[in-house]
Every structure is written in structure tokens, then in C-alpha cells.
Image (tube, helix red, strand yellow):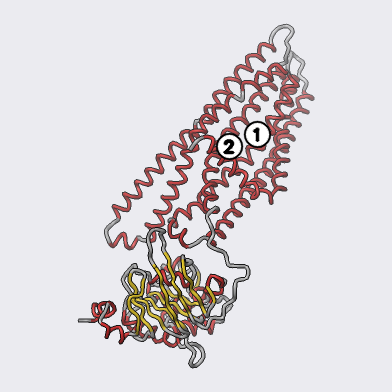
Amino acid sequence: MSRQKKNALDLASLKRVMPYIRPYRLHVLLSLLCASVSAAAALLIPIFSGNAIDCMIGVAQVDFRGIFVNAVCIAVTTALAAVAQQVLATSNNRIAYCVSRDIRNEVSVKLQRLPLSYLDRHPIGDLVSRVIADVDAFSDGLLMGFTQLFTGVVTIAGTLGIMLALNWMIALLVVVLTPLSLFVAAFIAKNTHKYFTAQSKVRGEQTAMINEMIEGQKVIQSFGHEDESLAEFDQVNEELGKVALKATFFSSLVNPSTRLVNNIIYAAVGFVCALLAIGTNPMMTVGGMSKFLSYASQYAKPFNEISGVVTELQNALACIRRIFDLLDEKDRPADAPDAAMLDAKGHVTLTDVSFRYVPDRPLIEAFSLDVQPGQRIAIVGPTGCGKTTLINLLMRFYDVDGGSIRIDGTDIRSIRRSELRRSIGMVLQDTWLKAGTIRDNIAYGKPDTTDEEIIAAAKASHAHSFIRRLPDGYDTVVTENGGNLSQGQKQLLCIARVMLLEPSMLILDEATSSIDTRTELRIQSAFARMMQGSQPGEGRTSFIVAHRLSTIREADVILVMKDGHIIEQGNHDTLLAQNGFYATLYNAQFGA
């Protein structure tokens, strides 16, 4: 990346950060005030110290009263500076915390608006790294900027004014030479930025790998892949170590380099002041020399701090750009302002639907289907034929590229997503439970439900019996993603969660794949009752994706898909009689 482009990105990032700081401008003003008080106190102490020194120069000419007065002034000024520093630190911490909190909140909202295609393309660990590690790194850089930058600027301005008043020639020498340390710092900072950027990127890859290793630990161990996984992790860890060491090495050069320059300047100023303080008619007192050396040191110190801030900001800006890259991603299409409500009866029509995940790789082409209310539609076919994709389109996790999907005559793109998904209960093969109680998980889609309704749904899904055997029953706490439950138990809870909602339509995507055969028969019976609807003669339109063909014999229509097309359609007996692809699949499972 060219230096000009990098500077433009840095400036753009800083401009984008300002709206996050603006709501806390009162704290910023308080920080400026405290920084001014702290700097003023630091500037007064050398004056009192120099005056005290001048009070004790000369044989039998010690001014004890003057020494005492200046000592009291030093004590009071030091106490005032300590209070100002404490308030400054508290205020700056609050600014950094609130800004990072607001950014995380915005990222959280953004994640809810992103299309699933983005989440499918990016590792979860990398997203976690951006939300946690990158925001923390930016917060640290922001905190250092507020804490040291404000104080440093005020100190430089105040010190410069006092030195000009004491001796403008020596002050000019200090002013001309001291900023040389900034040029040293800027030269080093140019080399640190690329390493900080690489460090953030590799850290995201490492977080993604750790997340993958933890989630797949059972599979890793069952295949004896521990050594290979550790080798892959060591490789990423080694790469992170290399870029982190380079970033640390170059950033750590800033402070000693600038200190070396400033110490040389300090020695030169001390030498000049000493020449002015000696002789029969000295042009400067010893106390005055002490003041000037103190101010020369104070004038140089903020440049050291600012150079450190610049280095830290390199890392902070590299991290915040990763956050802004995420925030700049295109949202999924928003619901239309006049989006329709939905009271679904269950008439689903797909007309010439086409869809592809990758632009140059067609998946579903010219797909048409008419599902009458209350019908049970089973979808079967080989892996990758488009079964789950069809479900994703029905739920509007993805929008069709061509054609239309209508429910009761209304295009689902003109229906609020929340309304559409409230009308469709979905049970997936991949179970998901949130950290919380069994009761919370069953009532996830209906928080205001009663305990009686929760228990009824658990009984209907045949989950009640195992829940009663848990230590705390429905109050048993489920760990992250149900780690303390079996796969079958988690799936029963997911089924109970849907049964509680009593939706207008159902989608069952391998809903009983992790359940034993005896329980599966009971669940199929419960699903059959659920598909019948709440009123006599009223059925729920249901889409059933299954590999086990025994679970779909009673379906009204079985769609046999291959390469994104329906190649066969009919009920179980009709398809067997055709002796086509469905019959081949069925005989492969039950022919023996």
C-alpha cells in the first residue's frame, strides 16, 4: 500500500471515529480541563523548586521562610496535579469504554443485518476477533491518545511560553532541536503500520482456527488428527509471532531513539546554562538554571509520549479499519416500507425460480412448484441437489435470483421477514441451543408463554421424560450450544420449541436424524398430529427434507430433486411404480 493511500485511509478512519466520540464531548472537555490543570501544576513545580534553591545560595544567607513557603507550594501543587490526573484518567477511561461499547453494539446490529452469504464466506473466529480483540486494541489506542495527547500538547505549549520568558535564546535552541525526535519517530512508524495490519489479520485467522479446533475437538480426536491440528496451529502461531515481533521491535525503537535525541539536547542545554551561571557576573542563577533544565526536560517528554501515541495509533487504526470493513458490508435487502403482514393459509407457489450461490455456477434453474394448503411435501435427492437451498429460499435466508415464491398469492419479497418466519416453524438437523435453562430454550420463540404450555410442548415432542430426570428439571442450565446434553436430547428440545409456537407451516430438515428409532416413531406421530392443524379438517403445509425415506412414506407429494431440478414427482406408491430414481434410492435403503 502506498504511503499516500495509507494516509488517506488513516484520515478517513479518524473522521469516522469522531461521531462515536461526539456524544461524550462533556467528558472530552473535562479531560481537556484536567489535562490543563495537571500540566499547569507540573509547570509551576520547577519555579517553586528553583526559587527554593536560590533561597539557600550563599554562606549564612539561607532564607528558611522562603524555603518553607516554596515547599508548601510544591506540596499543594503536587496534590492538585494528582487529583487532576485521577479525574483525567477516570474521564478518559469512560470515553474509551463508551466508544468501544457503542462500536460493539453497532457491529452486533450489523451482524443481524448481514446476508447469510457473508457469514457463510467468513470464519466465525475472524468475526469474533474483530468484535473483541480489534475493538479492545482500538480502545487501548484511543485511551492512550486521550490520556497522553491532551496532556502533552498543553505541556508543550505551557513550557514553551515559560522558556521564552526566562531566556528566549536558549528556548529557541530547545525548540529547534527537540522536534528532531518526532522525525525519528515518524520514520520508525512508517515501518510499523504494515506489521500491525498483518498482526490483526493473522490474529483473526488464529482465533478462527482456535474456534474451529474447540468446536471440532471430538472429530479431531476420533480421527487421531491431534498432531496435524497442532501443527497447523503452530504454523499460524509462528506466523503471528513473526509479525508481532517485528511490530513490537519497530515500535519499541521509538522511545529509546527519541530519548537519545532528547538527552543529547538536554546535555547541550545544561552546558549552555552552566556557562551562563558561572563567572563574577553570572547571567543566570543556579535556581534559574534548575528551572530551565526542568523545563527543557518537560518540553522533551511530551514528544516521547506523543511518539508512543503515534505508534499505538498505528495499531488502533489498523484494527478499526477491520471493524469499518465489516460495517461497510452490504446489508441484506431491507423489507419494503409497505411490506405486507401475513396470515398464512399455506398455499405456496414457486414460479420459474432460479438461484446460484456462485455467479458462474448454476444450482436451481426454472424451478416451479404449486403446493396446496395442508399438503405435506417431501423433498429427497442426492447431496448437493438443492434441497436445503430450497428451504433457505422459502425462509428468505437468501432471495431468488429469478422467478418468484408466493404464499397465498403474495410474493414473499413483499412480506416482512419477521412475519414470514413467524408463520413457518423450522427444525433443522443442526441443533442450536442458547446458554440458559431448559425452560428458556423451549420458550425461545415465545417468551411470554406459560409453564403449562412449555410442559405440553415438551410432552408432545417426547422431551418431558428426559427433562424430568435432569437435576433441576426445566430449570436445568444448558451450557453453550447444549454441551451437557446428547445430540438427540438437543434435537427434542428444538422440536419442542417449534411445537410451542404452533406455526401455520412447517419445515423439517432432517428433524429426527439424531433420535433413536423408537423415539423417532413417536416424534413422527407428534409431527403428524401437528401437521393436521389446530382445527378439524385444517392441515399445516409442511416441507420435509429427509434422507431416511421411511420418514416420508405418508407425504402427499414427494419431490425428487437432482442438480436443482425436479426429476420425479408423486406419492410414495406412484414413484415406486415408476421404477425411476426414487425407486433406486428406496431400494438402496430397503431392498434387502
Hey, which quadrant is residue 305 in on the image?
A: top right
SS at circle 1: helix
Q: Quick one: quadrant of the C terminus?
A: bottom left
SS at circle 2: helix
Residue bearing the label numbered 2: 309
What is the number of the mark on residue 396? none
Left or right, residue 423 beside residue 337: left
Q: Return the residue found at the far bottom.
A: 536
Hey, which quadrant is residue 267 in on the image?
A: top right
Give how far across and how far down residue 85 sits, in percent. 67, 40
Q: Amino acid at mark 2?
A: Val
Q: Identify the residue shown where x is 41% and y is 57%.
A: 211
Seen in the picture, residue 195 relative to 323 is either above or below; the reply is above
Q: Residues within 10 Å of mark 1 (few under 14, many from 20)?
A: many
Residue bearing the label numbered 1: 152
Give how far across and how far down residue 415 sits, in percent. 56, 73
* Disc with the residue nearer the chain's start (1 vs 2): 1
Residue 142 or 314: which is nearer the viewer?
314
Q: Amino acid at mark 1?
A: Gly
Give how far across and how far down residue 577 sits, in percent. 27, 85
